[in-house]
Structures are given as structure tokens and as C-alpha cells.
Amino acid sequence: MYGALGWCLEVLWTGLGSLLSGDVRLTAKTYLWMFPIYGLAVLFEPVHDRIRAWPITLRGLVWMVLFFAVEYASGWLLRFLTGVSPWDYSHARWQIDGLIRLDYAPVWFGVGLLFEKVHDRLRRMKIL
């Protein structure tokens, strides 16, 4: 579920990015590698259960840090195993090792809070 949701969000993100760059075709892209990486979000469900009562700002910060950690670690591992990471942020000003962009912090903050809603909905539907 999380792998598919991550793919969809990435397609929306890159498609809107292409629109902002003047591409009215809304060209979007993702990588097959991303499905299992986004799928790792299932491992964060126990974290959500533990931090559920925390203030929204603190929860968003937790998600932001966790998502940055997964993005960095998975990019590093893929680069180690294959010689290249599917994404390369080395051109960006606020990047670290070309693997994460600190200016994406608000995005990860928001995606984490969205993840909470998805987790709760899956639980209500008795999928979890």
C-alpha cells in the first residue's frame, strides 16, 4: 500500500514540478527502486502509535527526520551496490551528498502527517 502511495505522490510531485518548469504535458517520473523504498513506511506504523498523542509540530519533525534518514540510507545503499543513486540532488543548494535536499523538509513534514491519516484509515478498514 505505502509503495503504491509513494509512487503516486512522486508522480504528482514530479509532474507538478515539470509544469512549474513550463512543461504543460506534466511529464513525471519515478523509479522502480522507489516502490520498495516507499514500502518501508510500513515499518513506521509502530512509531505513529507511540507518538500519536504528541503535538502535531513534534510529530511532523519526527517524520521529517525519519524520511530524510530513509532517503539518505537507501540512496547511499543503492549507490554502493549499483554505483549510482536513482536521484541526484548534487545540483541543489541545500543538498547533502546529492542524496537528500534539506529544502524538502516541509514536504517530508507534510507527507509524514499524511502517512498518519493513511495509517489510521487502513486500521479503520481493518486492513492492518
Image: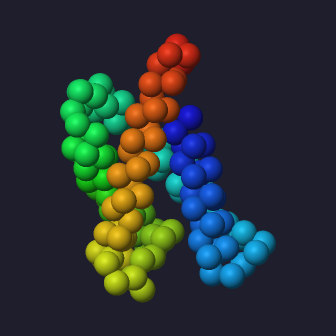
Quarter where residue 53 is shown = top left
In the image, residue 9 sits, relative to residue 118, either above or below, namely below
Residue at the far top in the pictured view: 126
Residue 66 visible, this orientation: no
The mark total stands at 0
The residue at the point 30 percent across, 46 percent down is: 60
- Of 27 and 36, nearer the camera is 27
Q: Quadrant of the N terminus?
A: top right
Give how far across and how far down residue 6 sits, in percent.
Answer: 54, 48
- Of 64 and 36, nearer the camera is 64
Give how far across and how far down residue 48 sits, in percent.
Answer: 31, 31
Residue at the far right in the pictured view: 25
The residue at the point 72 percent across, 78 percent down is: 23
In the image, residue 60 sits, relative to residue 107, either above or below, namely above
- Of 102 and 29, nearer the camera is 102
How did the renderer colour the structure?
A: rainbow
59 to the left or right of 8 = left
Give how far across and how far down residue 75 sits, in percent.
Answer: 39, 64
Residue 106 visible, this orientation: yes
Give how far across and how far down residue 85 sits, in percent.
Answer: 45, 70
The residue at the point 31 percent across, 53 percent down is: 64
- Of 65 and 79, nearer the camera is 65
In the image, residue 108 sits, relative to residue 57, either above or below, namely below
The residue at the point 28 percent across, 40 percent down is: 56
